Structures are given as structure tokens and as C-alpha cells.
Amino acid sequence: MALLQVSGEDEAVRAANVIRKTQSICPECNRILPAVIFERRGKVYMTRTCPEHGETEELYFGSYQMYLKFSSYWSDGKGTKAPNVQMENCQCPANCGLCSNHLSHTGLANIIVTNRCDLTCWYCFFYVKKGLEGAYVYEPTLEQVRMMVRTLRAERPVPGNSVQITGGEPTLREDLPDIIRAIKAEGVDHVQLNTNGISIALHPELARVYKEAGVSNLYMSFDGVTPKTNPKNHWEAPYAVDGCRKAGLGVVLVPTVIKGINDHELYDIIGFAKENIDIVRAVNFQPVSLTGRMSKKEREKYRITIPDCIERIEEQSGGEISSDSWFPVPSCSPVTHFIEAITHKPQYELSIHFACGAGTYVYMDRSGKLVPISKFVDIKGMLEYLDEAAEEINSGKNKWFVLAKVAARMNGFIDKTKQPEGLNMGKLLFDALVRHDYSSIGQFHMKSLFLGMMHFQDKYNQDEERLQRCDIHYLTPDLRIIPFCSFNVIPEWYRDRIQKKYGVPVEEWERKTGEKLEAKLYKGELRKRRPSQPEGSQQGCGCAVLQQSISNI
Amino acid sequence: MANRLDLEAAEETVVANFSVTPLVSEVTPGRELEVEVAFSVKGKLRRSFSRASWQEAYEAHDLQLRLAYELTLVRRAAIFHHKVFGPLRLVKKAKLYWSRNPDLEDHIWAMVVDEDGMPHIFDREEQVDAALFDFRRRVLIPSGALAPGDHVLKAELRLRWGRHLYVEGGELRAESPPFGVKVKQA
């Protein structure tokens, strides 16, 4: 570790508490550096030293205990056997494409269909801003979208099967239904639409149009339950949810969590999802990625990690959703390996790094209380048993015999005294794992919520071991597949370069289309008080109207 | 020394140095008996799971070596042995992963997840080897398992592992040497 200079009062603590060594980048110059992950006072940090720009130390994971639990589920994926970039030596984050050293196939492929947006949020780095040097409108053609999806479908051993249409604001594209149909026509099963929901709030019929075109669910920003914490779509989100309800289009709420800004409302956000459990399928919290140049003090002010969010949810829920309910994403691997052992075919695998994401399911019982499934299912024991069963099949035991054994044993992992009334978890697991019948999971979803966490990286906490396992990727018109945390963490190498190459300057776009970029900006129609309402009233807007509409239902 | 070398070179996999040591020689009724169980896995399995095989196994997506074992404590009697505790089922495993530790010569490395689910990452192959194949664990025997009086006990071990690119699956059984323990009268 020639470049690593550990100095100062924490030297002894760091040296004694090294957890593992990895690689990172210098946030100033992107130089690849050796890095050390270490524990200090119950939290996990990463440090590295650039010979030119000095040391950068950053909070990596807010709980050492949770880090230990999560890292025990470490499970590398199958990677891609048909890489677009052949690399002798791994050089993350350079040359992404995917390269031959990438360890996860695409779990979710993002396609940016436009970088125009109808909002101008101060903290967003992702929409085209008129007047800025290098402002390009990026809108791939339908044919380019088709080719991108074909690249995704050509992945081996597991062809990509899940696409997120994203932006900017994708609903600004009038040909969006054609794009959705084109993606479906290439054989993609799952199409998710990432939106702020404003178009649907204004024109609820769009929800049906998108659903009929092939959208599986909306992936909608929802940062809090007050106008202050959710200036983006506080007033509009309930209307959008209502539009989706009428169309039968599921919604995933996506809060970006920033310490000191909205981290006190995490359970309230879950509460909003619970009120709409008939149509909201999940809440996927995203601890903020800190972009741009920030001082250490500023980063400490806003930095929040997955364990911090999980602990806040436990506190805010009064222990209802406890910290031990959460499992890292790669903990699903034993399920995948078991199905692979039975089918003898490579299966879709969520093999991201354990520090990237976490999740749990909560089931709403008859009293309206949310019960995490780990309260009545021995998740750890069941995963271990599936691991063992897969190993037995792979070691030559008759798979039907093992399957029968698994089927007989499944109920043993369920504590029926704690299982919410009306739920038969044993049957559900049996149907899904043994019969591959997922219909009962659909019914389970009507009374349950998936709670997820996904912490995208930034230049300050970038760990190349995480990047190498990333399974959320971007499809680009040059037919590469680029991991999220390269694409957005080093935009000067990826996102900006691609958008410039395949986009057109704003002025040219305006000339060609005859439109003005700002013409599509949202003018806040749904934020205005209705004429019949008294001044200062918030009734008829925002979350209040939805609660009223739910109680009417 | 010759014995140790013989075991390491053994054609088959063997359990060596299996011992059970009570932490106290006398226990009062109502108190749990704590014993330390130790054994080592030597021979073919241990030799096969080495840096030399990690890369090939990793490329074949053969990523995990599970050592599942069961411990049963029995009381020796004239004809039959009576089970007093167990089987206690435990799993220790090694997971192969791609490390970006610049200090390592090979990028495919192994971490060990112990019986309590605690992960251990090491810099040296010998450390991985010892953490995986040398077992030392304290086990609590419930207070009601033994009646007052003198007992001669022994432990039975059943160890299993699956088939991998580098080794065939297998199962081993072993017995510890007997040990004595006294449960005092109430």
C-alpha cells in the first residue's frame, strides 16, 4: 500500500480496525487509488490518499454490526459471457461497457429517452439547462432504442429482461408509448417508467396509455410527505397515484434521502405507501449521492447510508420495522442457486455488492400494522437450507427427492403463531419455489410492501469492488452497457460525453422542432388553491386530497 | 510430527485432533456445562481447497465450500450409548470472491463465514486455511442433560461437504476421546 498514508490521531484505530482493502478514485482527479475500509466507533469508513490531492476519508456504512451481517451474504455473480469490452486487466471505473471483468449481468437496464425535464430542481444534475455551455438535448431515436435493447437481450448467460425508461422526464416524449411497445417487442418482460408523476397527475388517462403500451409499473420520485421535504411533487404525487389506481398500474415510490432534509419522514413515506397499498407495491429509498465538489463538513452534513436509514425507520416506527428485518440484496442468491440446480439453467441473479442495497417485505395485518416477514419467517435458516439443497442436487442427489424434502421442510421455517391472519406463507413459498407458480405472490403483493434501499455511489465513497458488481446499468446508443456508478459518478467520461455525441445543441433542437425548451416546464397548475377554498387551505391538494379519496373508496 | 505430516498427506480427508474439553470438571445442578470442541480437517479436502484451485472454481461459478457438521454428545454405557445433547448442526463456509485488494497477488480470494455468520477476510492463504479447516468452538450443554453423578462422555461428529470442481463430495464421522465430568448433588 505504497500510496496509503494513514496519519493523525486515528492512525492506530484505523490500522487496528482494517476490514478490507479495495480500490477507489480520487474525487479531484479520478486517479485509481488503493483504499482501506475500516471500523471506527461502530461505523465503517473508507480512506485513500492521492499523491496530488491528499487524503479523502468518507463514511462508508453507518453501522459496523450491519456491515458484518450484510457482508456474510457476499455472493459474486455469473458476470457477462458476451462482454462488449474485452479487458486483460480490470481497470474500474475506466473502459466500462460492460467489460469482461464485470461480475453481474444486467439486473435493470436504464434507457434515457430524453434529458429534458418539466422541473428545474436545484439539486438535480440530470436535465438539460438552457444557456449552459455544452447544453445538449439527448433523445435517442426509436431505432436507437431498439438497438440498445437488442444489445441488452444479447447478454449471456442471462439475457437482460428488465428495463427502466428514464430521463430527464420521459413523459415529455410524445412517442413514449411507441418506445414502450418497441422495448416490449424485443422480448423484455419488465418495463418500469421512472417519472416525477406530474404528466400523469395532469392527464390521468396517460397511466392507462402507458400500461396498455406495456409499462409494468411507475417508479415515481416521492421525497417526503410535506411540501418542504418534497418540493418536487408533493401536490401532484397523490393525483398521479390515483391515476395509476384507475388504470391498475402499480407504483413504486422512490425517495432520495438526505440527512437533515427528509430523513425524519422515512416512516411517514412508508405510511403514505401503506395508505395506498392497493396500488403502491414498494418504497425504494435511495440515500443521496453527493455530486459536485463538496467540503468534508458539507458531506458530513448531508451524508446518510443504508444502515442510517434502516435505523431511522426502526426509530420512527417505534420498532415496528426493526433493523434486523433487513437483508442485503445478494442474500437472494441461495434462492437463485436452488432454482439453477433444479433447472440446470443460469437464472437471473441479484449479485450486487452487499453494501449497495437492502430490502425487506412488510405485510399489513388486519389491524393495519406492518409486520416484516422476518418476524414470522426464519429467513436466515431458510436461505441456509436452500443453499444446502442446491449443493445436494449439484453433488448428484436426485433433484425430485431434494425438491420433495424442501417442500416438506418449508413450513418449518414459518412461525404460524406469529404469521398474520389470512396469510399462508408456507403455501406461497411452496408455490413459488417448487411449483414455479407465482400467482399467490401477486395476492401477497396486494397486502404487502417491498421496502428497499439502494445507495448509488459518488466520487467520495466510490468502491471499485461495488462498481464491479453493479447490476443497474445504462444502455447507450454506441451499444455499450455502462454501470450506473460509472455513468453518473464520472459523467465526464460517460454520461456527458455520450449525450454530447448523440445529442444536439439546445438551439438546434429548438430550431428543428419549433419548440422552446422551457415551453414544457410545469407551471404548478395543481399547486394552486381551488377558487372555492379559503385562503391558506391545503385541502384539495397534495397528500390531503388523496387521504380523502381513499376514505371515499 | 510424523503423524501430522502423514495426515496432511493423506489420500482421503480425515478428522484429526478431535477433542472435547470441559471448562470445569464439576458442575452444579441447574448450571449449563460448557465444553470446548476442537478438531481439524486434514488430507485431500484441505489440500484441494487452495489458491491453486480458487481461480478455476471461480470461473466455473463454483463459489462456495460449505462444511456442515453435526455434534452429538453421548454418555458411555455398558452396551448402548445414550445421547445427552444434540445433534447441534453448524455450518462454516468459504466464499470465493474477486478482491481488489492491491496487496494480493491473485484477485480471486476466499473469505470465511463462521458458524455464527461472522465474515472473516484475510490477507494470507494460511489464515484462510486455518480459519476454515481448524475448528474450535465452545458449546453449552443444557443443565438438564446430565443427572447428578459422574459421567464419562464423548462427542460424535458428522461432517459433510458437497461436490466441487476441486474435490468430490464426502462425509466423515469421528468420535472424540472420552472425557469425564461430575454433576454435583443438589
Image (cartoon, coloured by chain):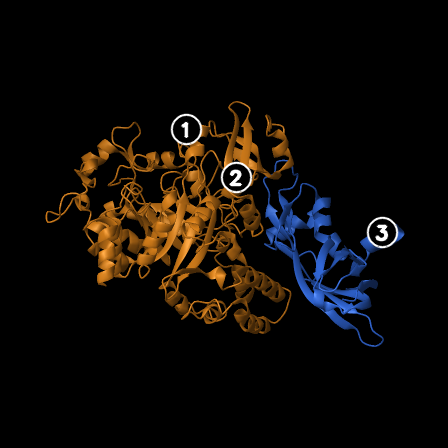
- Locate residue A446, reporting x and y percent: 35, 64
Residue beneath label 2, please? A464
- Locate residue A57, reporting x and y percent: 52, 31
Residue beneath label 1, please? A293
**Which secondary structure lies at badge 2?**
helix
Q: Which of marks 1 and 3 is in front?
A: 1
- Sooner in the amino-acid sequence: mark 1 or mark 2: 1
Q: For the view shown, which residue lies furthest in the left direction?
A: A532
Q: For the view shown, which residue lies furthest in the right direction?
A: B2
Q: Report which colour depicts chain B.
A: blue
**Which secondary structure lies at badge 1?**
loop
Q: Numbered disc 1: what chain?
A: A
Q: For the view shown, which residue lies furthest in the top direction?
A: A52
Q: Residue drawn at (24%, 61%), measured in percent from left and top? A: A551
Q: Are the residues under marks 2 and 3 on the same chain?
A: no
- Whether residue A406 is visible here, answered yes or no, is yes
Chain depicted in orange: A
Residue beneath label 3, please? B5
Q: For the view shown, which residue lies furthest in the front direction?
A: B186
